Amino acid sequence: MATIQEYGCFSEQTDLVALVQAAQDGCGEAFDQLVDQFASTVHAICLRRLHNQADAQELCQEVFIQAFRKINQLEDPRCFAGWLRAIATRMAINRAVRHKPIATVEPSVAAIDCIEHETPLGRVLARERRNQVHQGLGRLGRMDRETLEAFYFQGRSLIEMSDDFQSPLGTIKRRLHVARKRLAKELAELATV
C-alpha cells in the first residue's frame, strides 16, 4: 500500500487530480484528504434527501466507504467531484425510498393530539375578531368591501374576480391591495375605540 510520502507533501492546495491518483494507488492518507475536502458536500446531499441529521451523517460515511471501494473504477481523476456527488445522490435516494420513516406513536399520545385545544376564552376572542372584521368591512366603500368579500369569503380567484368585475387582472390585484390597507386602517381605528 502506498503512503503519502511517496507522493510528496499534500496540503489543502494539493491538486485534486494528484490526490485522486494517489488514492487510486492505495494511499490512505490521500483518500483521507479527499474525505476532508468533500465531507460537507456529501453531507449536504444526504441531508437534502433524507431530512434527518443522524441518517445523513450515517449515509455520508457509507458514501465514502463506497467511494473508497470503487475509486479504481474512476477513469478520469478530474471527474472525482461529480462522480462522488453521483454516488451520494444515488445512495441517498435509495435510502429515502427503502427506509421510509415509520411513525411510532403510542395510541394514547395520538389521541391527545387529536383533542381540540380550543378554550372558551379562545372562542370568545375569535368571535370578537370576526365581529371587528365585519364592522371594518361595513365601514369600507362598496368596491373595497365587494373585492375583499369576493376574495376572502367567497373564495374567488383573481381571474374569476377579473371576469366578475369586468376589470383587468392588474386592476383587481391593485384593488385587493388597497382594500386590505383600508381594512387594516379601519381595524386599527376600531381597536382604539
Image (tube, grey):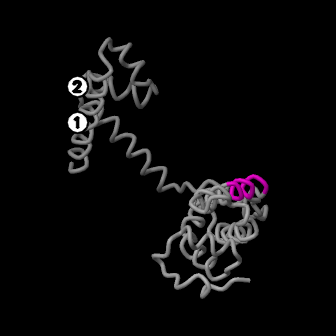
The segment highlighted magenta reads 90-98
**In terms of depth relative to the viewer, which is nearer, 136 or 37?**
37
Describe residue 135's horizontal placement relative to residue 128 as left or right.
left
Describe residue 33's horizontal placement relative to residue 75 as left or right.
left
Mark 1 belongs to which amino acid?
Answer: Arg
Q: Quadrant of residue 4?
A: bottom right
Q: Is residue 165 a member of the stretch shown in magenta?
A: no
Q: Is residue 122 above or below residue 68?
A: above
* Residue 78 percent across, percent down from the top left: 56, 60
* Residue 112 percent across, percent down from the top left: 69, 61
Residue at image mark 2 = 141
Q: Residues within 10 Å of mark 2 (few under 14, many from 20)?
A: few
Mark 2 belongs to which amino acid?
Answer: Gly
The residue lying at 26 percent from left, 42 percent from top is 184
The residue lying at 37 percent from left, 27 percent from top is 149
* Residue 62 percent across, percent down from the top left: 72, 69
Q: Are marks 1 and 2 in contact (CB under 8 Å)?
A: yes
Q: Quadrant of residue 20?
A: bottom right
Q: Residues within 10 Å of mark 1 (few under 14, many from 20)?
A: some
Q: Is residue 18 above or below residue 99?
A: below
Q: Main secondary structure of the magenta part?
A: helix
Q: Does dot 2 land on a helix, a strand or a loop?
A: loop
Mark sitting on residue 182? 1
**In terms of depth relative to the viewer, which is nearer, 15 or 94?**
15
Labels 1 and 2: the sequence-earlier one: 2
Mark sitting on residue 116? none
Q: Does dot 1 land on a helix, a strand or a loop?
A: helix
